[in-house]
Amino acid sequence: MITTTATRTTTDTVTPRSNPVRIYVTEARHEFLKLIRIPIFAVSTIALPVLFYVLFGLAFGGDDAGGVGRSTYMLATYGTFGVIGAALFGFGVSVAVERGQGWMRLKRVSPMPPQAYFVAKVVMSTAVSVLIIGALFILGPTLGGVRMPAAQWISLGLVLIIGALPFSAMGLAFGYLVGPNSAPAMLNLVYLPMAFASGLWIPIHQLPPFVQGIAPALPPYHFAQLALGTVGAAEGGSQALHVLVLLAFTAFFLTVAVWGFRRDEGRTYG
Amino acid sequence: MTTTQQTHHHPPTSRETSVLADLLGASKQFGKGPATVQAVSGLDLEVRSGELLALLGPNGAGKSTAIGMLTGLTAPTSGRAHLFGRDPRDVRARRRLGVMLQASGVPQTLRVSELLTQFRGYYPAPLPMAQIVSAAGLDGLEGRMFGELSGGQQRRVMFGVALAGDPDLVVFDEPTTGLDVESRRGLWATLRELSRLGRGVVLTTHYLEEADALADRIVVIDHGVVIAQGRPAEIKARVPGRRVRAQTSVSVAEASEWPGVVRASREGPWLELLAGSAEPVLRALLDLDPSASEVTVTEPSLEEAFLALTSDMEETQ
């Protein structure tokens, strides 16, 4: 039934050695599989920003925003909206659900490197981001007549992918602060108003003045300004400052996440 | 105690070392202040290669906490834990360990083969997939999602996960809970096979029957302390073998003083005694109360006997 000592030696030479790269690849692949096999996630996270872009960025057409065509402006803002959702929910909900599960305890007693778990989640939410960005980048030029030099397409895509990282940290922090059942609702309560007030749905300069006053305190505002910067539609203000603010937010949320992780360890692993 | 811990030393490597894991005066408490729960107090435990060790105790006895300390899930509040001579949280120690825990909560949307592949990947020399599948009785289930499986099938997947790394030490926290009789027998056979191949096996159970059928050594734990340990025969010798019932006016206090009486209780006119053997009890009973009637002598179930052993401890504490 179980291998004898003799056959065991032979299987040692036949079986490939565990290599760290393979562990990371498998973890990431399984993170992604877990996700896409729950269609509700794919639908809400991927379809929502795409649908919003079609409705508000393309269907209305019309006015320019920030000195560029509306469909170009909103490509940046709904791209921002989409990747933030992927990062927040990809991290927040799954960590909230999985922490304290028997499966995580089993991983803890296995020789899996703990960072593989987090790297896999970054890869997974980045993959979802790429799907969202891909869909928007197809719709923009085909339906919205968006025309940009290749360099701008590439820099917008890169800014959207990298800019999602602070929101992965934020999702992680939420994952350790809220329970598995309340996680999706809590995240939406933060995500949707924050997206609106940061000018991700309606161009920031069209928002009421007091909302425009709040925006600089919100991380998505700074992310959106970086994305808009790549298409030449930023509000002004230093791009370096936006980067600094996002780095500070990342540090803050990572600190909260580490605190939550430690608190959890004492509680759950008892 | 501290001196013993320091002199107690295992070379870190090699399969020749017979002690695979140990706890030395390990205590664990949860919570702070008045809410403190002392889960385990000063536990000494040694797991040897080729040995099938059963931790036997009722729910809440501290078995899972002991397992948690052995496997590095939780650090002892005081005392020491070693796994292959190292800190149990050391990755090098964990490469030789397989664990099956009680708690569920496995991703429902991954297939059995995917879950096993994932765990095999963590170990330098995993068991071939086909061997895991046959040892855990998962034939034909490889392509199924974990969430579609029955409770017993899910337990078997977890068993397969424990074997994935071809471990030198396997630790099972109540492995047969929720399994049907057939699965339980199959799992017992696999555990015996593992032990026969020189692997160390630790399991927790609250069935004396299971510990007796499987283990080379039984450690009985209750309220976080070891109350008895030894070979199954020795443990059984310590638990009462006879139950005597009679209608009598003899009080519980009087009967408790009789030779071999482990537990005495009263239920209306009935006096019930658990004792090592019946004859001395019957002699004392009829001496003190010649009018005692309806006397019966029966054999208590193993569960009852075990309960008597633990409640005996409570009284003497």
Image (tube, grey):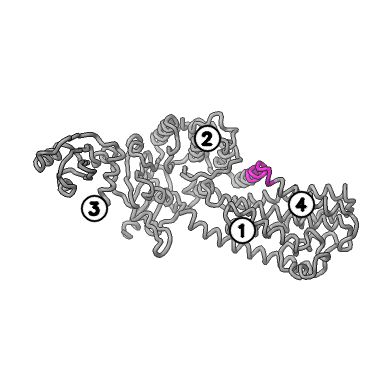
Amino acid at circle 4 = Pro
Quarter occupied by residue B303: top left
**Mark 3, residue position:** B316
- Choose between B306 and B269: the one closer to the eye: B269
Residue under mark 2: which chain is it in?
B
Q: Position of residue A151 (x, y in %)?
A: 84, 55
Residue under mark 1: which chain is it in?
A
Can you say which quadrant of the picture contains the C terminus of chain B? bottom left
Instruction: Provide the residue span drawn in magenta.
Output: A29-41
Query: Neighbour class for label 4 at 10 Å: few (<14), some, many (≥20)?
Result: many
Q: Earlier in the sequence, mark 1 or mark 4?
A: 4
**Mark 4, residue position:** A49
Residue A152 vertical position relative to residue A237 in the rendered view, above or below = above
Mark 1–mark 4 distance (CA, rounded to whole Å): 21 Å
Residue A183 vertical position relative to residue A209 in the rendered view, above or below = above
Query: Neighbour class for label 2 at 10 Å: few (<14), some, many (≥20)?
Result: few
**Residue B160, visible in the rendered structure:** no
**Residue B266, visible in the rendered structure:** yes
Q: Position of residue B313 (x, y in %)?
A: 26, 50
Mark 2–mark 3 distance (CA, rounded to whole Å): 44 Å
Say if mark 1 contacts mark 2, CB within 8 Å: no
Amino acid at circle 2 = Ser
What residue is rendered at 62% in x and 61% in y? A254
| Marks 3/4 same chain | no
Can you say which quadrant of the picture contains the N terminus of chain B? bottom left
What residue is rendered at 53% in x and 60% in y? A262
Tell me if B178 is positioned left or right of A188 in this view: left
